[in-house]
Image (cartoon, grey):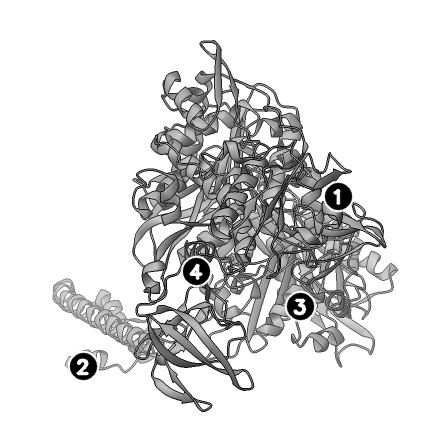
Amino acid sequence: MNDDTLHAIATAPDLRELQALRVRLLGKKGELTEGLKALGALPPDERRVRGAALHQRKRAVEAALEARKAALERAELDARLAAERVDLTLPGERVPAGAHHLLTQVTHRLLDVFTSLGYEVVVGPELEDDRHNFEALNFPPDHPARDTQDTFWTTDGRLLRTHTSPMQVRYMESHAPPFRVVVPGRVFRNEAVDATHEAQFHQLEALVVGERITMADLKGAITEMATALLGSGTRTRLLPTYFPFVEPGAEFAIWWRHPKTGREEWLELGGCGMVHPRVFEAVGYEGVTGFAFGFGIERLAMVSYQVSDIRDLFRGDLRLLEQFRGVA
Amino acid sequence: MRVPYGWLGELVDGLPPVAETADLLAGLGLGVEGIETVPGAPAGVRVVAVLAVTPVSGALQRVEIDDAGQRRTVACAAPNVRVGMRAAYAPPGASLPGFDGVLDVREVGGVRSEGMLCSPRELGVFEHAAGLLALGEDAPVGADLGALWPSDAVIELEITPNRADAFSLLGVARDLAAKLGVPLRHPAAGLEGAVGDPSADDGLEVRVADPAGCPRFSLRRVDGVRVGPSPVWLQRRLALLGLRPRNVVVDVTNLVTFELGQPSHAYDRDALTGGVLEVRRAAPGERLVTLNDDELALDPEDLVIATPDPERGSRAIGLAGVIGGREDSVRDATTSVAVEVASFEPIGVRRTGKRHKLVTDARIRFERGVDPALPLTANARVTALLAAWAGGRPHPGVTWVGEAPTAPPAIAFRPSQVGFLMAVELAPAEQRRHLERLGCDVATDADDRWRVTPPSWRADLALEVDLIEEVARLHGYEHIGTSVPQIAFVPPPTDPTHWRLRERLVGAGMLEAIGYVFTGDEDLARARVPAAHVRLSEPQGVERAVLRTSLLPGLLAVARLNRDAPRLALFEVGHVFVEREEERLGLLWRGHGAASGWRPAREHDVYAAKGALEALAEGLGAELEMRPAPFADLHPGVSAEVLWDGAAVGRFGRLHPEVAADWGCGDVVVAELRLPLDTRPPRLRELPRQPFAERDLAVVLPLDVAYADLHARCAQAAGERLVELFAFDVYQGPQVDEGLKSVALRFRFRHASRALTDVEVDADMAQIMAALRAAGYAWRT
């Protein structure tokens, strides 16, 4: 035994060599093992001296083996880590993110607000009849108010609903008050198509009926919606106007900062009012009052996201659809 | 409707500035669309008299004018230049809004022209370029036209269809005066004594054959009329309204239409046979040429104004309440006119107007309802204006057929309802004042029981809520409070907009499109989807003539539009119109799946698309199966009916290559499913405590046997210990015989409470293999 042994251990090139050394020194027939076995044949005094020296030597060898093993293992790990290095700045492999249509996002955001306020979401047919779209909503035949609703009639005498309000009639025909409902849906107007007018667009309509519903409740509901959309301190404005199915009737606007111009101004949103007694009559309700309000989704979406041409919303150009990714 | 601010100020005392007035109008429910500042005549333009007109060549004439005593020459091509007329003259150095550059002295076709005579368009006062602005004798020669024709602001109002009364300056002024609490200056004030004596013989006769269609008719004779240009103030007023001045008679009737809201018509009296006018329904086959030179084929429902005719007995000379006829209208040579002011029943006027697609100022007012108390007053107003500005001598008599209107029924009204419904505090006395200012008559039966009679011009007021709105409108909607409705209502948890479905699709990397419900027969045929069930009667073109019967043509169009995109994954949720209206989900895939761009991407083939649907079903708690079935629009070998929890909900497959080529949309995989797709809440089971035992078997069977059949056969034979079965390899090639394929199956068996022995599992496998052998299949070992 000499320092050559320790040197050999310390310079063992790899774990295999090191293991061979361990066997040669500490194996069943290893040099040190044999030496320790031979101790038994020695006289006691010599055995003690020689044994102590051998044990010391064994500990030194073991320590050297462990140290070398640790060093070799670390080197091996380092080598592996170096080999496994990749460039994480390269693009990942993925399915591109999907996106809801902008109109769906805006509608859903509004529905979220209304469901949290205790409204039920209901939907109805797009192909309607005269009774639900007009008559029961107090648009008598041959009334000029029908001119405000450029109607797509079908050859079989039906029509594409000009507003979501037919659902007021449908819901009341099949439910008893009190209730709060909100109706999103697609509506149609047969008017010239341009950057701000489409033959199809979307509306959202709310209807609340109970024993003592008032115009203040209406204003409160609009204010709550506006606050949920735009934050606290939002102001709302009602101006008198006429819709056959409400009386008193109003148009409503909310005070907001225009996202493009940055100017604070009234955003004219839609129409509202107290449900007309003739509408209640048409569905057989008595002794209740109610309010309704409705507005267009496209307009809100377009001013909020600066869409300049309404037709782009329905063309399906991927370059636009892809921009709808993100969190509304 | 355009409301000139200056004119409005003549009717309402102390009118606030224009912007403030517009705000007041908006607050009254007379919707303000905008305020336009309309310039007056340009500076430097003077009134001149035409002294001589000499034709030069073609249309060109040399015109000599009296320019405040100076004789000047101008070149002029206007057809209406006449000796003696007054015209607008722009001297050299003037600049005009409708004329490029600065005027100069120059030669035009050999005529030395010092400036020019101007058309209305060149002056920028109204849109007419076919002749000079013709002025009447009220315009003094040498006067500065800019001073006679100053600028004004025009408030543009959108009058709602209920407010028939507000289609006039008078109606707008009434609301404003009521709001401001100031007196109204009625344009016809003082004419009460000038309505004419019905018993006097004026040589006119009116025969109303249809009193229901025409409840009231007045005809007033005015002689000695000089038909010429209107006075400047009248022309300017019409120009501000957006009308083109014609001649003083027509202009006066138009003015009164807008001033009082009562349309009228002036006939050349000499054209009325025997001075007789008839009001009757049109005869079958009768025709009428209108003022606008349109020849109308009249319907027997049309109400016409007619005069006796020696040949035909009677001939129509006007369409009642809509438009006059060409033949009997006032012309330059007319000296005696008969002024018609009548009431026509709204629905008849509306139907006639719609039938002939005529939207006129008269129709707009009659179909909404004109104040029935107005005809005689309005006739007196027209007559007075003709006397003042056309030299007319009104006949002391008037021909009148019809009855005075009865007062509208009183409305029971409770002032307490204003407080309740509008949530505004307003004392009954204040409410009464508001109603009275609007022209209502208020009688009090008890504290909270009033009888309110609306004025003759407010036919829209019929119910208590109408009066509540009137009170609130005048008080101001800004006083309405804010509260939260207190009702006991718990909405059911439903998802009618399919939000959860959409969320999963978007999460799977799909983009949502929204297409049109309108489509064309040709697109439906080219997409090989069912023909249209619903057709529009007045479509916006053949490509939008019918309603879609499938969402797929719309998605194919999107795929074509985006044909250069390497990857498409689209969906749409929308209505289709087949035997009934139903809601569907359309899906389309094209190109690769997951990709990085810098190493090879997997093609997004039909199995990837199917996997997306399977994952969708799995996520919603449903089971999805596909049963091979042919569909016209799909590749015959890649086409299946989709079963959702066992129910057929639609189709899935690769688009038929012919359809794909026809649409230019590329090789796409599509699906269309009926909504709603049933969902199930999560169902939790106890976790298995035992490991499963696994066996593999490569079954060799004919190519045309569906995997679903193999799967079902194995599952049926295996018994209840088989908990999982799936294919982990499908092979066809040299290792198996021609016409055969090898499907490697992995079976997993488990017992709920104990470990299975090899003997038990082998027994299960033996049963399965027996069933496969019975079907004629082999297996590879």
Q: Residue at x 28, y 78 (%)?
A: A21
Q: What residue is shown at x 81% (from left), y 78% (from top)?
A: B737
> Alpha carbon of mark 4 to alpha carbon of mark 1: how far?
37 Å
| Circle 4 or circle 2, nearest the eye | 4
The residue tagged 2 is A7
| Of marks 4 and 3, the one in the foreground | 4
Foreground tag (4 vs 1): 4
> Dot 3, how many residues are within 10 Å of its Cα: few (below 14), some (14-19), or many (20+)?
many
Q: Measured from the top left, where is residue B544 in percent x and y? A: 68, 63
Dot 1: chain letter: B
Three-letter amino acid code at disc 4? Glu
**Residue at the spot of label 3:** B669
Asked if badges 4 and 2 are on one and the same chain, I answer: no
Q: Residue at x 35, y 64 (%)?
A: B145
Q: Between residue B703 and residue B554, name the one nearer to us.
A: B554
**Callout 4: SS:** loop
Q: Which residue is mark 4?
A: B137
CB atoms of marks 1 and 3 within 8 Å: no
* Residue B754 appears in the picture as rendered: no
Q: Position of residue B262 (x, y in %)?
A: 56, 42
**Helix, strand, or loop for circle 3?**
strand
